[in-house]
Image (tube, rainbow, N blue to C red):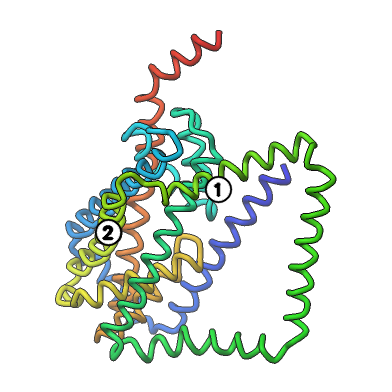
Amino acid sequence: MKKRIFTILKVAFFLSIGFFFIWIFLKQLSPEERQEIILSLRQANYSWVLLSILVGALAHLFRAERWRLLLKPVGYNPGHFNTFLAVMIGYLANLALPRLGEVTRCGILNKYEKIPVNKSFGTVIAERSVDMIFFLLLFFINLWIFWSQLANYVNTHVFDPVSQKLTAVGHNTTQLWIAGISIAAIITIGVIVRSFFRHARFYIKIKNIVKGFIEGLKSVFLLQKTGLFILYTFLIWLMYFLMVYLCFFSMPETAGLSYGAGLSVLIFGSIGIMIVQGGIGVYPAIVAETLFIYGITEVKGYALGWITWSAQNVMIVAFGIFSLILLPIINRKYMQKSSVKSQ
């Protein structure tokens, strides 16, 4: 019961942050500007949005195939359908709680493909690490190519806040001492616990979990098809970019924007999704501010932000629910065989 209440409170917390940002942005607008946003949403060409949704689903198909490549070095070869459906259900779960999707999709492969969760979860962390490296690469490429347009934005929203935090930490040596002592204490406690409980059953169980997790992480260095892995990674991010860029054509004001604007929205919008669960409220505001750099009014940029955000989430919800329905159906024979064997 306590766990359920905590989960509800956690979801409510993230939703409240999103609604707070929506309220803050709309409060700054006049009634005419709010009406203009509604009109832009009504007049948008949603055929481009539908195409964007299909492209987004294709990105997750490439993600599923890339995940299969990571699972092979640890000794498993799950089916194409089960892996894709697990990925889509995982993204659906992530809309409810941060990082719940990673555990969910590993649990699905454990149920239908008999892959230990600790090993598959290690591969998920590995692919997330690769995505973060690729994201940072795109981030700095974007800054380098379009620095003249983005300099003011980055200085105001990235460098200044970070430098202020670093300066504050640098002046407060007490915090540094506390952090150092805490790390030393954790290491000491870890050594003591290991020496006293290394033969205990629960310690061995935890050790095996960690071992499987590390084995999953190592999979990225044991790939048999490294070139294909890199290709899938490139295609995933290309589809992410196209999902954003295609939405530009849904509004006449943004239809003529450059690829650079699309890349900027992808990069800074992704940061919004990382900050607040699902990017609710934050994502449209970031898109509006980013497109303002490229000459789009804040009102039109905000409308496009909602269109792009809605396309991403409609894709996740639609394909996620479809996967939930389809998964037990296509695995019915397998489950029947498992039940017979258990008897």
Residue 263 spot, x, y in % from top left:
28, 72
Q: Residue at x 31, y 56 (%)?
A: 233
| On-image quarter of the N terminus | top right
Looking at the picture, tell me which residue is in the foreground, 63 or 193: 193
Q: Residue at x 50, y 61 (%)?
A: 277
Looking at the picture, tell me which residue is in the foreground, 224 or 261: 224
- Is disc 1 surrounded by few (<14), some (14 to 19) or many (20+) residues within 10 Å? some
Residue 57 spot, x, y in % from top left:
28, 49
| On-image quarter of the C terminus | top right
- Tell me the distance, in whole angstroms, between the alpha carbons under discs 2 and 1: 25 Å
Circle 2 is placed at which residue position?
Answer: 234
Residue 77 spot, x, y in % from top left:
38, 33
Q: Look at the picture and state if 190 lies above or below 171.
A: above
Q: Secondary structure at mark 2?
A: helix
Marked residue nearer the N-terminal end (2 or 1): 1
- The amino acid marked with disc number 1 is Ile
Circle 1 is placed at which residue position?
Answer: 214
